[in-house]
């Protein structure tokens, strides 16, 4: 949409190295690095942290792909094998969060560790990963913005809006972390402001066929309500309430 870019970075015979797959692998590596680094400072055992990180990544990828496939089921009914090709794109961030949290809770429950304390450690990886994946969406020609004559690209660069949201959330996290907040405050603050920014900015200008209804403006290139719009108030309220509990 922004540029005519090849989604394949490198071809080695039948093997393709795609930009999306590379950004996803880089996101995982960066997330695990900060998770281990900051977790050791909190006194957690490195083997436990690494095991937990791998399970969270595994659960996150399954959840992200599962929710994406379920909300785009018509694209896969004729070719179900396409459902497993995550390297070609098609991951739901909300599904990834849900899958990662479920997997994390199962592991943490056995060790009787603090979910909130460990969840805070995931925020740098989540914000950086969101930025990198939105950048990779440009190469896959996905997460397209709504058409508008106001944009030099002919439509809103929704991928860049999403990447900017990730960077803003990373900056906010770094500012909050300096204040030594209670356990869980960083994670639930991230989820709270992600939900707000995603719902107001990215989703409003995104060409999203998921349950789109209501008002659209072709000149400004905006519209609502999408499925994400409709669930955002509940997510914001839940994240706000969970963050409030951390202060207690």
Image: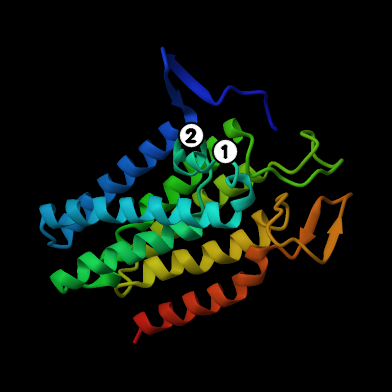
| Dot 2 and dot 1 residues touching (CB under 8 Å) | yes
Residue beneath disc 1: 137
Residue at image x 81%, y 43%?
A: 147
Examine the image and state in which quarter residue 3 appears.
Answer: top right
Residue at image x 59%, y 49%?
A: 162
Q: Is residue 240 left or right of residue 247?
A: right
Judging from the image, what secondary structure is the residue with disc 1 in? helix
Q: Is residue 76 left or right of residue 180?
A: right
Image coordinates of residue 46 in percent, x first then y, are: 12, 53
Image quadrant occupied by the C terminus: bottom left
Judging from the image, what secondary structure is the residue with disc 2 in? helix
Q: Which mark is residue 20?
A: 2
Q: Is residue 171 visible?
A: no
Residue at image x 53%, y 36%?
A: 136
Q: Looking at the picture, does residue 228 appear above or below residue 143?
A: below
The number of discs equals 2
Q: Which mark is residue 70?
A: none
Q: Looking at the picture, does residue 141 appear above or below residue 39?
A: above
């Amino acid at each position: 949409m922004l540029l005519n870019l090849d989604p394949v970075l490198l071809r080695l015979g039948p093997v393709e190295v795609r930009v999306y797959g590379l950004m996803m692998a880089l996101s995982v590596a960066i997330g695990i690095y900060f998770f281990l680094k900051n977790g050791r400072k909190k006194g957690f055992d490195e083997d436990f942290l690494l095991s937990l990180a791998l399970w969270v990544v595994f659960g996150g990828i399954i959840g992200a792909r599962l929710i994406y496939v379920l909300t785009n089921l018509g694209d896969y009914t004729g070719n179900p094998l396409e459902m497993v090709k995550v390297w070609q794109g098609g991951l739901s961030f909300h599904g990834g969060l849900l899958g990662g949290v479920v997997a994390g809770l199962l592991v943490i429950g056995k060790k009787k560790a603090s979910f909130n304390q460990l969840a805070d450690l995931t925020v740098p990886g989540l914000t950086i990963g969101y930025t990198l994946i939105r950048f990779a969406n440009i190469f896959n020609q996905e997460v397209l913005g709504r058409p508008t004559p106001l944009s030099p690209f002919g439509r809103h660069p929704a991928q860049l809006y999403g990447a900017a949201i990730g960077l803003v959330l990373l900056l906010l996290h770094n500012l909050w972390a300096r204040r030594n907040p209670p356990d869980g405050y960083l994670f639930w603050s991230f989820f709270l402001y992600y939900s707000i920014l995603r719902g107001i900015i990215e989703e409003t200008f995104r060409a999203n066929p998921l349950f789109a209804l209501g008002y659209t403006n072709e000149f400004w290139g905006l519209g609502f309500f999408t499925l994400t719009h409709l669930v955002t108030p509940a997510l914001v309220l839940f994240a706000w309430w969970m963050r409030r509990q951390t202060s207690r």
